[in-house]
Amino acid sequence: DAGITQSPRHKVTETGTPVTLRCHQTENHRYMYWYRQDPGHGLRLIHYSYGVKDTDKGEVSDGYSVSRSKTEDFLLTLESATSSQTSVYFCAISHSPYRSGDNEQYFGPGTRLTVT
Amino acid sequence: AQTVTQSQPEMSVQEAETVTLSCTYDTSENNYYLFWYKQPPSRQMILVIRQEAYKQQNATENRFSVNFQKAAKSFSLKISDSQLGDTAMYFCAFMKGYSGGGADGLTFGKGTHLIIQP
């Protein structure tokens, strides 16, 4: 298994509070991704990173920000959590997403976030 | 932008049977990759099989194979000799074959819940 951990694994928070989720990898992969999974929607890309301090938006980036100050860590922040952000959040990593045979994304175990 | 459609929300088959999961996609890209991921009740996302769009030969991985029809934008997954451990959500996913131009990362379908009955 790829060395990817997510913390916390479960969190319950109140509307309006800030929340930060952490993804940590030990594989030294360049690319990191944050997805959210909701019933009836599959997984959707929130933000991704293609190197230290290099990030870009995904399909559902509103209300989220990210930071990557080290290769191994990719943080997802909800500045002011809302009930619509209740979801399961997955981090993924990839070594060479655009190279055939080496483009697998490896996923972390997920974080279940509940905003009340 | 691309879209991925899985038209079967749930399927159920008997153990040892063969089952085919459907996936269609829409894109204007010519360089891309397609994937099938499995998500068992543990919630872990596991890559089952991948296909490069430029390859005409269908990918196979043991009991898993795909039927890739590029012109029809179809990418179905066939599971032979199904086992109880195959019970899971299965997601079809698309990814561009190059960086830039936005929309990087995987685009997923909504999934098919496959149940293998003993």
Image: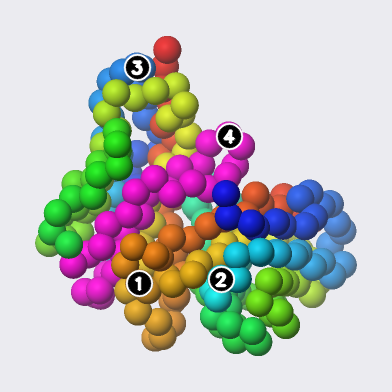
Rendered view: B100 above or below B77: below
Q: How many marks?
A: 4
Whether residue A86 is visible here, answered yes or no, is: no
Please tell me which residue lies in front, A56 or A85: A56
Label 1 chain ID: A
Q: Amino acid at mark 3?
A: Gln
The quarter of the picture where residue A8 lies is: bottom right
Within 10 Å of disc 3 (Cα), the crowding (few <14, some 14-19, many 20+) is some
Q: Which residue is mark 1?
A: A99
Q: Which residue is mark 2?
A: A29
The quarter of the picture where residue A49 lies is: bottom right
Q: Amino acid at mark 1?
A: Arg
Choose mark 1 or mark 4, whichever is in front: 1
Which numbered disc flags the more N-terminal residue, 2 or 1?
2
Q: Secondary structure at mark 3?
A: strand
Q: Which of the labelled discs sits on residue B76, or is there none?
A: none
Q: CA distance from mark 4 to mark 2?
A: 27 Å
Whether residue A82 is visible here, answered yes or no, is: yes
